[in-house]
Amino acid sequence: MQDYIDLKAHYRFTEEEANLLKQLQPRMELLAEEFIDGFYDYIWGFGKTAQFLKNKEIIANHRKKIKEWFVNLFCGKYEMTYFMYIYSIGEIHVRIGLPTHYVNSAFTFVRTFILQNIEENFENKKLHISEIKAVEKILDMNLDVLTSSYRDGELSKFLSLSKFEKTILSGLKNFNSYVNFFLAGALALVAFFAIGLFAYDIYLLFFSDIGIEKGILTILGSLLVLWAAIELIHEEINHLQGKGFAIGAFIMLAMAALIRKVLIYSLSSEKSNELLTIGVVIVGLAIAYWLVGAKKRTTII
């Protein structure tokens, strides 16, 4: 862990600020129950909190530990023992697989709760500003140490690998990058051909006996495929920038291609069986797309 003296120096955390936090402790102790109730209301909104707080015993212990951490924010003594205590909390988060996003988001509630209370009890402007600065610094240092435990956990996992395993891992990462760039190029080629298909359908509308009704429906189908291809390229660009893989975009492209067929076959009485089959497939794809979207929404929440 980063040396606690350097940590405090980098945040310019002074003994005067430590004393200010100590003076706030009695008031914050009185607010501990209100804090923990609000904190739980906040983290249950994450959607996946129940995966980590699985029963009443774990919840009771967790509430106790969070309350202790909250009161200790204002202990006034921020030496090695204190920061090792914070670091050990981070190690527990790493061990249970708690996403750093949850930690960062929870700190928003903590920060807002404390600063709101300080604001409501405002008397002296100079003291008020000093208290805010002290609170901001101790919270940022806590978050810094918690985050460092995640970095150290990832590093230790990597260092525990053998030389051969590290070589394989690096090779797979490079190969994955090449495949993603190849996929982006392939999607651009698909979009290019979709433009060609659209142009060809316009040609057929004006220079063949395809019929206006069928021609327009065919053109609309081609536009739908082109739109889906462009959307897929957009999602692949996001993926290359580090965002999640959008399987829903691939499903949408498949649906667009099938809907194009439906638009074409709908004018033919001889294609009723094929239309029925395609319709069933489209419904299946629509359900899959909805499930993927529902999972994504749950993850965000």
Image (tube, helix red, strand yellow):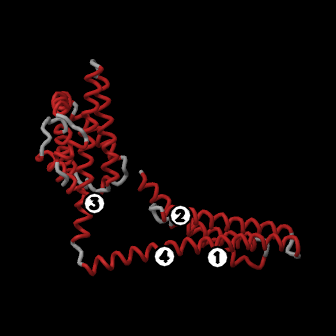
Left or right of 102: which side holds 269?
right
Which residue is label 4 attached to? 179
The mark that comes first in sequence, 1 or 2, is 2
Measured as percent of width and height from the top left, residue 265 is found at 75, 74
Residue 65 appears in the figure? yes
Residue position marked by numbered label 1 in the rendering: 277
Residue situated in front as seen by the camera: 226 or 13: 13
Q: Quadrant of the rendered structure where residue 24 is?
A: top left
Whether pointer 1 and pointer 2 mark residues with C-beta atoms closer than 8 Å, the reply is: no
Q: CA distance from mark 4 to mark 1?
A: 33 Å
Q: Amino acid at mark 3?
A: Gly
Q: Callout 2: helix, strand or loop?
A: helix
Which callout, 1 or 2, points to the residue nearer the camera? 2
Q: Residues within 10 Å of mark 2 (few under 14, many from 20)?
A: some
Q: Residue beneath label 2, please? A: 237
Instruction: Name the image quarter holding residue 252.
Output: bottom right
Element carrying mark 3: loop
293 or 2, which lies in front? 2
> Residue at (37%, 52%) from the top-left corner?
47
Kindly check if marks 3 and 2 are in contact, taking CB atoms under 8 A apart as contact.
no
- Determine whether the residue tagged by mark 4 lies in a helix, strand or loop: helix
Residue at the far bottom: name it: 164
Give the answer, above or below, for where 22 lies relative to 45: above
Query: Whole-Å distance between the Cαs marked 1 and 2?
Result: 34 Å
Secondary structure beneath dot 1 equals: helix
User: What amino acid is at disc 4?
Assistant: Val
Q: CA distance from mark 1 to mark 3?
A: 44 Å
205, above or below 68, in the image: below
